Image (cartoon, grey):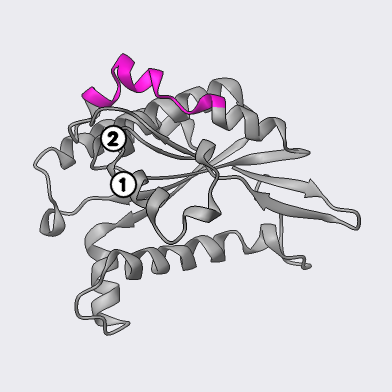
């Protein structure tokens, strides 16, 4: 979520993060990794079971019980002027598809007037790791369509090609891909973070 917070001198944007996964493996790596001191444990939320990489499993009551709304509500209550939410997720896996669909639906109900910007990673056949990814993508696209104010789609294969052809990285890592995506996010949010005659609020 992104907010405008009041300092003694001026308003400035502040980001509050919540990381969610229905199985603990990936977030456990964050908790024990070199960036563990950047995040409070309440920001890192995991389930006890895997979503089995499928959207239907991720939309069961198990996922609902794991829903991170309590953590999001706590951070929203801390905001002087909540502007909206950034939602980062993949379309091909269980948490990114099914759980995110539920989450965005709840955000629409609880924070209907706040903008929701969606940054999505679309799977590609050439770099796919699961046969169910196309099905998850179709179901998630249909479900999240009415709950997103603006969606930025990143094609998995295309971003690999950009790294290879434009940046001369023969074997891109997740770090390379994430840094490239972060440049997209940085450019999109520049008008929110910097003052200027041509810059506008994302919620206008």
Residue found at x 55% / y 44%: 40
Dot 2: element: loop
Q: Residue 79, located in which quarter of the rendered image? A: top right
**One can see residue 135 in this view:** yes
Q: Give the number of the disc on residue 26.
A: 1
* 165 is within the stretch colored magenta: no
- In the image, 107: left or right of 126? right
- In the image, 145: left or right of 137? right
* 68 is within the stretch colored magenta: yes
The quarter in which the N terminus is drawn is: top right
Marker count (numbered) = 2
The vertical placement of 84 against 180, above or below, is above
Q: Which residues are magenta?
A: 57-70
Residue found at x 23% / y 42%: 92
Disc 1 + disc 2, Cβ < 8 Å: yes
The residues tagged by marks 1 and 2 sit, at their Cα atoms, a distance apart of 8 Å
Expressed as whole percent of the image width and height from the top left, the position of residue 108 reads 54, 26
Residue with the most extreme bottom position = 168
Dot 1: element: helix
Q: From the image, tell me which residue sits under label 2.
A: 23
């Amino acid at each position: 979520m992104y907010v405008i917070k009041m300092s003694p001198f001026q308003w400035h944007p502040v980001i509050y993060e919540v990381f969610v996964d229905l199985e603990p493996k990936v977030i456990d790596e964050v908790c024990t990794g070199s960036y563990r001191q950047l995040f409070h444990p309440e920001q890192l939320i995991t389930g006890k079971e895997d979503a089995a990489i499928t959207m239907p499993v991720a939309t069961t009551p198990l996922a609902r019980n794991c829903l991170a709304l309590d953590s999001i509500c706590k951070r929203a209550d801390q905001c002087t002027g909540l502007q909206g939410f950034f939602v980062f997720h993949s379309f091909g896996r269980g948490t990114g598809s099914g759980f995110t669909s539920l989450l965005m639906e709840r955000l629409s109900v609880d924070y209907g007037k706040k903008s929701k910007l969606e940054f999505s990673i679309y799977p590609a056949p050439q770099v796919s790791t699961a046969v169910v990814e196309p099905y998850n993508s179709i179901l998630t696209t249909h479900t999240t369509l009415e709950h997103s104010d603006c969606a930025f789609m990143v094609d998995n294969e295309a971003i690999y090609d950009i790294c290879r052809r434009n940046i001369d990285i023969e074997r891109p890592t997740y770090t390379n891909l994430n840094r490239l995506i972060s440049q997209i996010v940085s450019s999109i949010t520049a008008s929110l973070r910097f003052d200027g005659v041509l810059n506008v609020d994302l919620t206008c």
